[in-house]
Image (cartoon, rainbow, N blue to C red):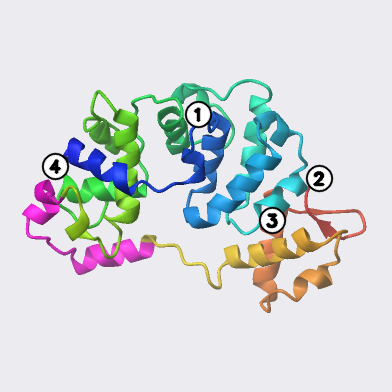
Amino acid sequence: MINTAALLDWFDSAERPLPWRRPGTSAWGVLLSEVMSQQTPVARVAPVWEEWMQRWPTPADFAAASRAEVLRAWGKLGYPRRALRLWECAQAIGEKPVPSDVEKLLKLPGIGDYTARAVACFHYKRNVPVVDTNVRRVYARAVDGRFLQPQPSKKELSAVEKLLPPENGPRFSAALMELGALVCTAKAPNCEGCPLREGCAWQLAGCPQPSEAELSKAKKRVQKFQGTDRQVRGLILDVLRGADAPVPKSKIDVVWPDAAQRSRALASLLDDGLAEQDSQGLFHLPH
């Protein structure tokens, strides 16, 4: 099970000095960090977050930027639709404070259940469960005795909520997430250095390994990147971000040899509002 005191003691010494954890970070800064960090390593996120907070310290500042500026600043963080959804979120917030209530946060564009709970918990110190893949993995091992975490489900929120201590709940949530990121990792957990080892259900069960079927299913859930439409979309966006003026299709055609895949990727960028075509047939970032 989860030894709260042991986990918090470990976190006191192991907590990473991430820039958005600095005292005084605004709710907007926390929201921004959570959206940027989805499916992206924090080492890549940190310098971009610093730049954005200097450039756009409030939602109103960010809402005044053009979509082209936003996409250029997003760079290679991946999943650039997140950048435009953040821009839409900032438009909705405007000069108002970032909401502190989960339900109100969920009404903002682009803000899902995880992000809403993370902002409420880590900035506003609401004792609400925050479940990402790291927490899901720690729970699966320490509580359920399984090496692999299951697919996300609504039930996990109530399960994790039962673990939250009445005091220091938000710090407990951050520690649980940090443990999954640093110690209870997906492929090679450092059980020797884990503060929960003595009560861990997976350890007590003799560290049972997943079956071949479970491993196969887990591998299928891992998203590849090389050769996918996502990669081609990124290459096309690189061209548009680096251009000072609209570009002809010939500039795009050179980035990928497969014409059908290239055409499909370009069409999806246009559909998603990440690129536009003018009356001359030239392509550019949205204004």
The Cα atoms of the two marked residues, 1 and 3, are separated by 26 Å
Q: What span is in magenta? A: 197-220
Q: Secondary structure at mark 3?
A: helix
Dot 1 alpha-carbon crowd within 10 angstroms: few under 14, some 14 to 19, many 20 or more: some
Please provide percent x and percent y for residue 85.
62, 40
Dot 4 corresponds to which residue?
Answer: 1
Give residue 214's quadrant in the image. Answer: bottom left
Amino acid type indicated by mark 3: Leu
Q: Quadrant of the N terminus?
A: top left
Q: Is residue 270 above or below residue 239?
A: above
Q: Judge by depth and name the residue closer to the eye, 86 or 194.
A: 194
Mark closest to the chain's N terminus, 2 or 1: 1
The Cα atoms of the two marked residues, 4 and 2, are separated by 52 Å
Asked whether, in this view, residue 162 is left or right of residue 182, the answer is: left
Asked whether, in this view, residue 4 is left or right of residue 157, the answer is: left
| Residue furthest bottom as drawn | 257
Please provide percent x and percent y for residue 207.
12, 60
Amino acid type indicated by mark 4: Met
Dot 4 alpha-carbon crowd within 10 angstroms: few under 14, some 14 to 19, many 20 or more: some
Q: Which mark is residue 287?
A: 2
Please provide percent x and percent y for residue 26.
55, 30
